[in-house]
Amino acid sequence: AFSMRHIGPMRDIAFRQPFGTHSNRTAFRQYSNLRTHIKENDVVMAPMETSWEIAGIIPCKVVGVRHSNPFMHDYFDRKAAVEGFFSILTSNEARFRILEEYSAKAVLIPEDYYHIAAELKNDLDTVFKDEYYHLFILD
């Protein structure tokens, strides 16, 4: 159901975050820094809540998106793959199989999932890191 709590400034107030945290301007600023590392047709693995934003700012492809799409016949498979990838119970071996299945070229890990970044950094090189994200590029 729709709620005013999900609209930019209202979300910030409802969740007691600094004003503007979820504005378009903030998202654009955060993701624009990644443009030098993520190419136009690269497939990016990112959490569902991040995927739909990044695909709108950087002209890349993502494994899964937050909202279903009637033209995406495997939406629920993709959703399960993304959720599985970011599960703490998933092994790195299983994560790499998911990345291979969807031909992912990049993995974007928000700060909420830094435990996964810590596991992946042994197998992948971090090409970008700031207070919001770790970005890994696959060869």
Image (cartoon, helix red, strand yellow):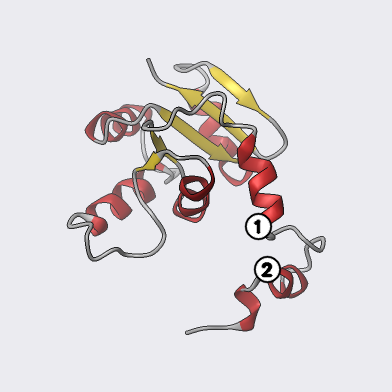
Quick check: 98 above or below 15?
above
Q: Quadrant of the C terminus?
A: top left
Residue in the foreground of this view, choosing between 118 and 128: 128
- The residue identified by callout 1 is 24
Residue in the foreground of this view, choosing between 44 and 86: 44
Dot 2, how many residues are within 10 Å of its Cα: few (below 14), some (14-19), or many (20+)? Answer: some
Quick check: 79 above or below 131?
below
Please identify the residue farthest to the left as the structure is shown. 73
Name the residue located 61 percent from the left edge and 24 percent from the top edge.
128
Horizontal side of 80 relative to 121 (left or right) equals left
Q: Amino acid at mark 1?
A: Asn
Q: Amino acid at mark 2?
A: Gly
SS of the residue under disc 1: helix
Instruction: Point out residue 84 in the picture as x, y percentages from the top left corner.
Output: 34, 46
Q: How many marks?
A: 2
Q: Quadrant of residue 11?
A: bottom right
Whole-number angstrom distance, CA of label 1 to CA of label 2: 8 Å
Instruction: Point out residue 18 in the picture as x, y percentages from the top left corner.
Output: 82, 60
Please identify the residue farthest to the right as the structure is shown. 18
Instruction: Point out residue 50 in the picture as x, y percentages from the top left corner.
Output: 52, 50
- The residue identified by callout 2 is 8
Quick check: 67 above or below 44?
below
Query: Residue 97, labelled with which disc?
Result: none
Dot 1, how many residues are within 10 Å of its Cα: few (below 14), some (14-19), or many (20+)? Answer: few
Foreground label between 1 and 2: 1
Name the residue located 29 percent from the left edge and 33 percent from the top edge.
94
Horizontal side of 37 relative to 123 (left or right) equals right
Return the disc, 1 or 2, that comes first in the chain's sequence: 2
CB atoms of marks 1 and 2 within 8 Å: yes
Name the residue located 32 percent from the left edge and 54 percent from the top edge.
79
Instruction: Point out residue 63 in the picture as x, y percentages from the top left corner.
Output: 34, 44
Horizontal side of 112 relative to 97 (left or right) equals right
